[in-house]
Image (tube, helix red, strand yellow):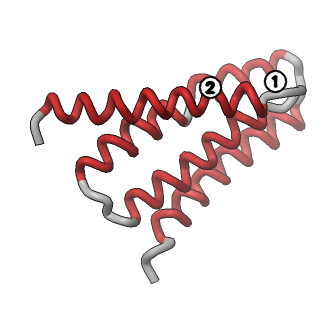
Amino acid sequence: MPALLHILLVALGAFFGAILRFAMSNLLNKGSFPWGTMLVNLLGSILLGLLYGLDAGEAWIWLLGTGFMGSFTTFSTLKIEHMELTFKKNWRKLAAYSFLTYAGGLFLAWAGLNMFHA
């Protein structure tokens, strides 16, 4: 597959992933817990696991895996929200957010990857 096609697939996927993340974050990040960010990261984990578990093929990996999931999920926002909870000394929310995001993300990626493998 030519490099230019890789770039176009990643760009197209990233465009839609970023828009959907923005919409979900605006809709769900209300109050003092970052529900929207956590949800997109967990959803992205299982979807990426499913994509690889289905052995979707190179073009789909570039479009959905690298492009869409790369911009839909957000490590940088996760880190900012971790820092905000730390500065506010909100240790319980920080612990819950960290555990649910990391452990939940690993579990969901594993579940997605193995969903179609008996």
**Mark 2 belongs to which amino acid?**
Phe
Task: Classify residue 23 as left or right of residue 92.
Answer: left
Task: Classify residue 96 as left or right of residue 72.
Answer: right
**In this orientation, which residue lies closer to the viewer: 25 or 85?**
25
Binning the other alpha carbons within 10 Å of mark 2 as few (below 14), some (14 to 19) or many (20 upward) gives some
Residue drawn where x is 21% and y is 35% of the image: 6
Using the image, tell me which numbered label, if any, was put on residue 114: none
Residue drawn where x is 82% and y is 16% of the image: 87
**Mark 1 belongs to which amino acid?**
Leu
SS under mark 1: helix
Task: Tell me the quarter of the picture where residue 89 sits.
Answer: top right
Q: Is residue 69 depicted above or below 84 in this figure?
A: below
- Residue furthest left as drawn: 2
Pointer 1 with pointer 2, Cβ within 8 A: no
Residue drawn where x is 87% and y is 32% of the image: 91
Question: Which residue position is annotated with label 1?
Answer: 85
In the picture, which quadrant includes the N terminus? top left
SS under mark 2: helix
Q: Is residue 22 depicted above or below 70 in this figure?
A: above
Question: So how many labels did they put on this image?
Answer: 2
Residue drawn where x is 65% and y is 29% of the image: 23
Question: Which residue position is annotated with label 2?
Answer: 22
Which of pointers 1 and 2 lies earlier in the amino acid sequence?
A: 2
Binning the other alpha carbons within 10 Å of mark 1 as few (below 14), some (14 to 19) or many (20 upward) gives many
Per the model, the C-alpha gap separating discs 1 and 2 is 21 Å
Q: Could you tell me residue 64's position as x and y percent?
A: 39, 44
Q: Is residue 99 depicted above or below 15 in this figure?
A: below
**In this orientation, which residue lies closer to the viewer: 73 or 19?**
19
